[in-house]
Amino acid sequence: MSARLRYYGPAVLVFVGVLVLWEIVVSVFGIQQFLLPRPSAIAAAFAERFDELITVGRNTLVEAVGGLLIGGVAALAFAFATARWATASRALLPIAIAANSVPIIAFAPIMNNWFGILNPLSKMMVVAVLVFFPIMINTLRGLTLVDQTSLELMRSYAASERAVFAKVRVPNALPYIFTAVKVSATLSLIGAIVAEYFGGAQSVLGQFIITEAAFFRFANAWAAIVVASAVSVAFFLIILAIERVAIPWHASARTRDAS
Amino acid sequence: MTGAVVRMRAVQKVFGGGADQTHALDVIDLEIPKGAFVSLIGPSGCGKSTLLRLIGDLTQATGGTIEVNGKSAHRARLDRDYGIVFQSPVLFDWRTVERNVELPLEMSAIDRRARAERARAMLALVELSGSEKRYPWQLSGGMQQRVAIARALSFEPALLLMDEPFGALDEMTRERLNLELLGIWRKTGTTIVFVTHSIPEAVFLSTRVVVMSARPGRIIDVVEVDLPQPRNDLTREDERYFAFVTRVRERLRGGDSAQVAAKTRAAAM
Amino acid sequence: MRVSSIYTFAVLRAARGPLSFLVLASALALVWEVVKLLGGEQTDAWTPPFRWKIASDLNMPHVWDIAAAFAEPAQRNGPPLGLVLVDAAIFTFREAFGGFVIGAVLGLALAIVFVHSGILERALVPYVVASQTVPIIAIAPVVVIWLQAGWLSVAVISAYLTFFPVTIAGLRGLRSPDPRALELMRSYAASPRDVLVKVRMPAAAPYLFAALKVAATASVVGAIIGELPSGIRDGLGGAILNFNQYYISGPPKLWAAIIVAAVVGIGFFAIVRVAEAIFLAGRLGRVET
């Protein structure tokens, strides 16, 4: 118990300390609210607009999750299909890594044109393209970066390609996949919010922030930012929990490494 | 006892091509009788591991013939005639101990209940009963290697290939596992080919020690170790045991120094 | 004979990256036109078997129309679009590079601090991670108000994205040396600075380069996003926003801007990769993040 307190204590202290300091500095120096609203003002705005914030947060989350599903499934399918041809996937990997450095966000207006600016699908597709490469690259790595001796062991059993795939490559890839999905969870939410910036339905986090900021209601905008972060963290934690359940051997092995 | 399990005739293995080629193995003739415990010993680079891998069809010879149980090594692999144990245990992190042992059985489409039963029996054989549900990382290095042995034996292969299986373990663990391995060998009657670079280990375990030299890899002597069975800790204090150890050591040194001298002369010219 | 073949091999290796990129780009263009052929718009010579909304000239302009748009003036009597976009690309790259440098220095500094102080690590690392869940597009206007509109404020916004991978990889890299190497330095009574410079930093180099590649990409993304809400219209983000507004009157212009943005992203990534290859030449064990 006390070990836990010692471990998490500093982080909690920083959280409380920063909030208090923030409140004091803003009040004492009279910093204007468009520069930085006080935490208490943000909290008040949060309470006041609670229902609306929940609605816009949910709508954006739907876009993010939908996009993550579309992009993730496509990435997995692509990686699994190409991993069967070792040379093809080796040639593909550097290209995919380079393609990953394309600022996907630039495609947001195109997706609005393609799938309809009011259709949530247009935001989902931005997210889908955004998460496609990280998940695909990591899956491909996990399927191909297999311990050579494990492959020899399977060879000594005269195992079929299928058995090698199912019993060695896929389990080996699972931690890689979860790592990518965890990163993509955060990415998907940010991607959705940026995509919303290029126009579309009003009842979403991105548009809420723009509108409130345009009317100088910065406390409301900051409350929405807090919601965005909170949703993002929650999404990440949910995937972390799924990972713990799905590949317990990995999580336990990791905590052992950490201790 | 008539048939040899392994029969090698004029086997060669050359790596690379052109000017860069190296003769890993040069004209190997070797027979391994059924039920034997044969050790391959030699300096690093003598091709002892390559020889083992040739028998297991994990690599192909560039000349000569290899028969395992009267068929080609390739056929023997497809028939699942041998189990293999590497220097590292190569256990799958994502499987419990029990399911690691079951792995080769899954390949032979043996039903679940029979697999579990077999795994339990094998783990009992290597004295790991009670660890069935644990994950590999929860075991010590010696225990992990015992799981690897249980896995290799689980489908009752005619031939057990072991590539320096205890090389990474401490001396005490190694001696205990040597005794255990001999016990398993007696109980199962499996033919074992064992690669090592420890002379005492080779002599203690084997009915026959194949002494090899490096570059090109050749067999310089085959020492029949007719120490009484079953062997135990007292064997290690037997005078004849020391005599065998000395003999293998001298053969290794002799073969070695002659080769080195020849090499040095060649390099000087 | 032999030497020349080695030389040819090296040239081929060096050319492989750009070459495969060209092949991929051509393949993409080919697929693009095939889609248009199958479901695009009717012409005098060809009636496509399908009618797909996505493949219309508005949604998917012809490859040659996009290419031609580079040469045509962006506005009436203005300079050709290609020149405008090159200017915008240079502007955005400057922001991105600024963000990259600020982020790398800050990220590495944080990693060094965290490696030496367990309390600070436990106190701050959770917030370093949480910081990446804050949508930068939302805080960008605030930064612009603080620092005045200009490339520097966008660079700071971009640094918000780039410091993170450097900190995380730096932390891992600085921790990666063999404990025995640290004990060896201890036996020499080496100062913490010596340990950092002679053991930890060299060990961290491969990790840092892996992170810098990620950071290069992130910095371009950050620069483009940063331009959007801050009213800065001289860069690629501004160009994308602008051509999006007038999309109906000229779809190829938006596509041209997107292509230039893609080239900037890939180009920056490639620069860091080359730097990595030079800096880590002869070292084993490149790290991937």
Image (cartoon, helix red, strand yellow):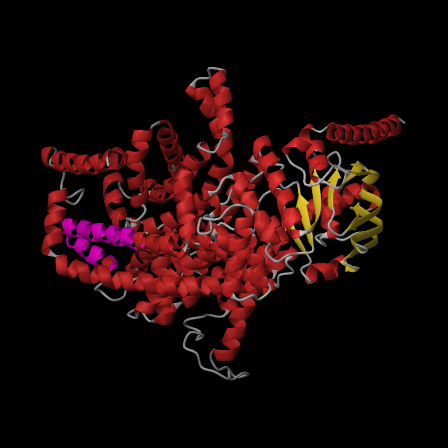
Toward the top, the furthest residue is C189
**In the image, is C145 to the left or to the right of C241?**
left
Report the front residue among B52 and C168: B52
Residue C38, compared with residue C102, is above or below; it is below
The residue that appears at 46% across and 41% down in the rendered structure is C212
In this rendering, does residue A154 appear at all? yes
In this rendering, does residue C91 appear at all? no
Q: Position of residue B235 (x, y in %)?
A: 68, 33
**In the image, is A259 to the left or to the right of B206?**
left
Q: Quadrant of residue A157?
A: bottom right
Instruction: Identify the magenta region.
Output: A206-235
**In the image, is A138 to the left or to the right of C129?**
right
Report the front residue among C201 and C17: C201
The quarter in which the N terminus of chain A is drawn is top left
Report the number of discs.
Answer: 0
Q: Does A113 lie within the magenta span? A: no
Query: Taken as a whole, is the magenta stretch helix, strand or loop?
Result: helix
Toward the right, the furthest residue is B269
Q: Does A228 lie within the magenta span? A: yes
The quarter in which the C terminus of chain A is drawn is top left
Q: Position of residue A40 (x, y in %)?
A: 11, 44
Q: Position of residue A75 (x, y in %)?
A: 46, 62
The residue that appears at 75% across and 42% down in the rendered structure is B207
Report the front residue among C42 and A33: A33
Report the front residue among A51 and A159: A159
Q: Position of residue C118 (x, y in %)?
A: 33, 30
